[in-house]
Image (tube, rainbow, N blue to C red):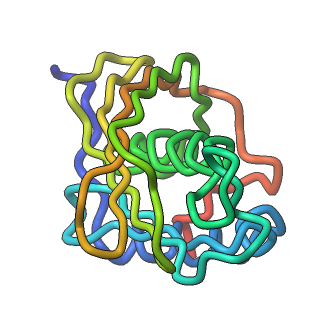
């Protein structure tokens, strides 16, 4: 595509992640976003807390609502891999659970499948602390032309 922006630098992606990680919702949930090698989005929940649990009516499995939030976050951040200066929003999220998610840490990762001028399709998976895939998701994300509330993207220093 002729109007495809050049890929962001790792520095821009790191700055975007740093700003995002300082937000209230990210601190409240306890997750961190990063962009390893600028090719995928990684969201980590380094410490699973009691309020994250309750899936399957147990005290050990992570609740499906937490897994859905991880998927929304990791898929919703994939447009930054193309252009971190644009705002975006998840339009559609489809999840499938493969096995109970247990353990003390959780990782979600996402990659872009395809994209157009304003819409992006991405796939994600959630892994337990042993590296087992416990759930998968696909999402559609809309790239916005609206400016950031602060007037500039978190990727601009």
- Nearer to the camera, 82 or 33: 33
User: Is residue 134 placed above or below 35 in the rendered structure?
Assistant: above
With 70 as the anchor, is 128 left or right in this view?
left
Residue farthest toward the front in the current orientation of the protein: 58
For residue 14, above or below residue 43: below
Residue 65 in the image: above or below residue 129: above
- Residue at image x 57%, y 78%? 18
Name the spot of residue 70 as percent of width and height, x first: 55, 51
- Residue 80, given in percent of the width and then of the height, sits at 42, 49
From the viewer's side, name the closer residue of 64 and 3.
64
Q: Position of residue 111 (x, y in %)?
A: 25, 44
Q: Name which quarter of the figure residue 132 lies in.
A: bottom left
Residue 114 lies left or right of residue 83; in this view the side is left
State which quarter of the image contains the C terminus. Answer: bottom right
**Where, quadrant-wise, is the N terminus in this rendering?**
top left
Q: Which residue does the image show at 59% across and 66% down from the upper left? A: 60
Q: Which residue is drawn at 33% across and 55% down?
A: 109
Residue 121 horizontal side relative to residue 118, left or right:
left
Which residue is rendered at x = 56% and y = 40% of the image?
72
């Amino acid at each position: 595509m002729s109007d495809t922006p050049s890929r962001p630098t790792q520095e821009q992606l790191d700055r975007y992640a740093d700003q995002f990680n300082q937000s209230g919702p990210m601190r409240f949930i306890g997750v961190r976003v990063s962009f390893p090698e600028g090719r995928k989005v990684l969201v980590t929940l380094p410490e699973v807390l009691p309020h994250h649990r309750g899936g399957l009516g147990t005290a050990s499995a992570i609740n499906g609502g937490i897994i859905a939030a991880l998927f929304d976050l990791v898929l919703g951040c994939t447009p930054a891999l193309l252009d971190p200066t644009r705002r975006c929003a998840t339009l559609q999220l489809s999840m499938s659970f493969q096995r109970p998610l247990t353990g003390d840490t959780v990782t979600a990762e996402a990659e872009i499948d395809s994209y157009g001028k304003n819409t992006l399709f991405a796939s994600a998976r959630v892994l337990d602390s042993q590296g087992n895939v416990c759930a998968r998701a696909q999402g559609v994300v809309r790239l916005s032309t609206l400016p950031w509330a602060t007037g500039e993207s978190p990727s601009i220093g």
